[in-house]
C-alpha cells in the first residue's frame, strides 16, 4: 500500500516561457504528489470527517460517488489506514468495473450500485436515515466530502500558501475546497475558481453562504472552460495536457486541473492579470482518473 506523503508536497515554479512575462511569477502547489491515487484536496476534505467518525466510535463510513470518483478512492484509502470499514454507493451500474472502482475494492471498499434517481434519493435526509437503519454505526459522508468538516479540512491547505501570492487558481467541483480556502486565506488574496462543468457559475450561489462574511470578497468562479461538460475531454485538451507536461514535467488530470490550466493560459493571453501579479495554481490531484485516456498521454 502506498502511503500518504504530505512531506512530498512542493511548490514548483512554472517556466517564465509559459507565462511569457505577463505576470511576475507563477507557481504550482503540487498536492498531487501526496499519493498516486488519492487526490490532494480529497485527502484534506476527509481529515475531519474521518477523525470525527473515529471519535464518535463509528465502525464504518458510507459515502457516494461516480465510477471514476476521486472521492471514493480517497475515502477507501483513508478508511483503510485507520481501520474503518468503507462502503461506496456508486451512481449507475457497471457490467465491467472501472479502474477506479477496482482500486476502491482493492483498498477494501465494498461497493453498492444505485440508479441515479435512487442514488440522489439516498443522499437526502430520508435516504440517509434509511442507510443508518441498514448500517448502524456508520458515518455517512456526502459525495465529494462536501460538508462543513470537509470545508474545515480543506482550509488546512492554506498552510502551504504564502501571503505574497496575489492570486490563487483552483479547480472547483462542489466548491468545498474553494470555500475552505477562501475562509482560510487573507482576503487580499484573490481566488479564482475554474468550474469544469457546463453552467458552473451556479457554484457562486453555493459557495457564498459557506463563507464567513468578512471573507466573502475577492473571489470568482469562471465556467468557460468545461470542454463540453463534466468529465468530457477533447483532442485540444489532451494536446494541451501533453504540451504542459513537456514544458514542466507536471501531469494534469483531464477532469479538473487541465481545464483550470487551460483557463489560466487564456486569462494570461487576454490580459486578465497585471505584470506584477504573483500566481499560485493549485494542483489538486485527480491523476487516477486519467486511466480512461490511456495511450493518449505523453507520460
Ligand atoms: C474533487 C476535485 C476537485 C473539486 O473539489 P471540490 O472541493 O469538490 O470543489 C478539484 N480537483 C480535483 C483533482 C478533484 O478531485
Image (cartoon, grey):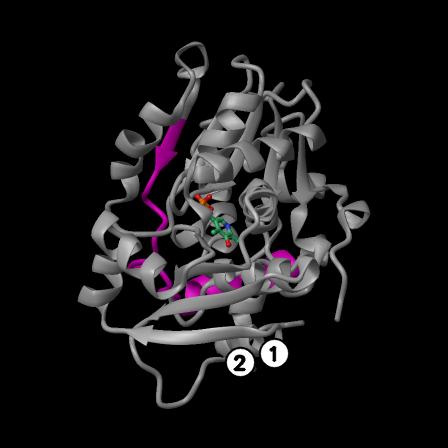
Q: Nearer the viewer, residue 134 or 67?
A: 134
Q: Quadrant of the N terminus?
A: bottom right
Q: Nearer the viewer, residue 74 or 159?
A: 74
| Residue 243 highlighted magenta (yes or no) | yes
Answer above or below: position of 66 versus 215: below
Answer above or below: position of 129 versus 115: above
Q: Quadrant of the C terminus?
A: bottom right
Q: Nearer the viewer, residue 51 or 42?
A: 51
Would you say the residues marked 1 and 2 are in contact, meaning their CB atoms lie under 8 Å apart? yes
Residue 269: x and y in percent read 47, 37
Mark 2 residue crowding within 10 angstroms, few (<14) / some (14–19) / many (20+): some
Q: Residue at x 57, y 49 (%)?
A: 57
State how many labels appear: 2
Residue 16: x and y in percent read 70, 38
Residue 137: x and y in percent read 47, 56
What residue is pinned by disc 2? 102
What residue is pinned by disc 1? 106
The quarter holding residue 22 reads top right
| Residue 190 highlighted magenta (yes or no) | no
Q: Is mark 1 within 8 Å of ligand 1?
A: no
**Mark 1, secondary structure of its residue:** helix
Farthest residue to the top: give it. Answer: 214
Q: Residue at x 44, y 84 (%)?
A: 97
- Residue interval drawn in magenta: 220-246
The Cα atoms of the two marked residues, 1 and 2, are separated by 6 Å
Residue 132: x and y in percent read 35, 57
Amino acid at each position: 500500500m502506498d502511503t500518504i506523503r504530505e512531506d512530498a508536497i512542493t511548490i514548483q515554479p512554472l517556466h517564465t516561457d509559459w507565462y511569457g512575462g505577463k505576470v511576475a511569477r507563477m507557481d504550482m502547489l503540487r498536492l498531487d504528489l501526496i499519493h498516486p491515487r488519492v487526490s490532494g484536496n480529497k485527502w484534506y476534505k476527509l481529515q475531519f470527517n474521518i477523525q470525527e467518525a473515529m471519535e464518535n466510535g463509528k465502525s464504518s463510513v458510507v459515502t457516494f460517488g461516480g465510477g471514476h470518483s476521486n472521492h471514493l478512492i480517497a475515502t477507501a484509502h483513508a478508511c483503510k489506514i485507520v481501520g474503518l470499514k468503507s462502503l461506496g454507493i456508486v451512481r449507475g451500474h457497471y457490467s465491467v468495473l472501472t479502474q477506479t472502482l477496482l482500486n476502491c475494492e482493492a483498498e477494501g471498499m465494498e461497493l453498492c450500485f444505485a440508479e441515479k434517481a435512487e442514488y440522489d434519493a439516498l443522499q437526502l435526509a430520508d435516504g440517509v436515515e434509511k442507510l443508518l437503519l441498514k448500517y448502524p454505526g456508520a458515518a455517512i459522508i456526502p459525495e465529494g466530502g462536501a460538508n462543513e468538516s470537509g470545508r474545515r479540512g480543506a482550509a488546512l491547505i492554506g498552510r502551504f500558501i504564502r501571503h505574497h501570492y496575489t492570486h490563487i487558481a483552483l479547480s472547483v467541483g462542489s466548491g468545498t475546497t474553494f470555500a475552505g480556502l477562501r475562509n482560510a486565506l487573507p482576503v487580499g488574496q484573490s481566488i479564482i475558481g475554474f468550474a469544469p462543468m457546463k453552467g458552473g457559475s451556479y457554484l457562486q450561489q453555493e459557495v457564498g453562504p459557506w463563507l464567513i462574511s468578512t471573507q466573502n470578497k475577492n473571489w470568482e468562479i469562471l465556467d468557460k472552460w468545461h470542454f463540453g461538460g463534466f468529465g468530457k475531454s477533447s483532442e485540444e485538451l489532451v494536446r494541451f495536457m501533453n504540451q504542459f507536461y513537456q514544458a514542466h514535467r507536471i501531469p494534469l488530470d483531464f477532469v479538473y486541473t487541465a481545464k483550470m490550466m487551460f483557463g489560466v493560459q487564456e486569462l494570461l493571453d487576454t490580459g486578465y492579470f497585471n505584470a506584477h501579479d504573483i500566481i499560485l495554481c493549485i494542483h489538486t490531484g485527480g491523476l487516477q482518473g486519467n486511466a480512461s485516456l490511456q495511450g493518449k498521454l505523453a507520460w
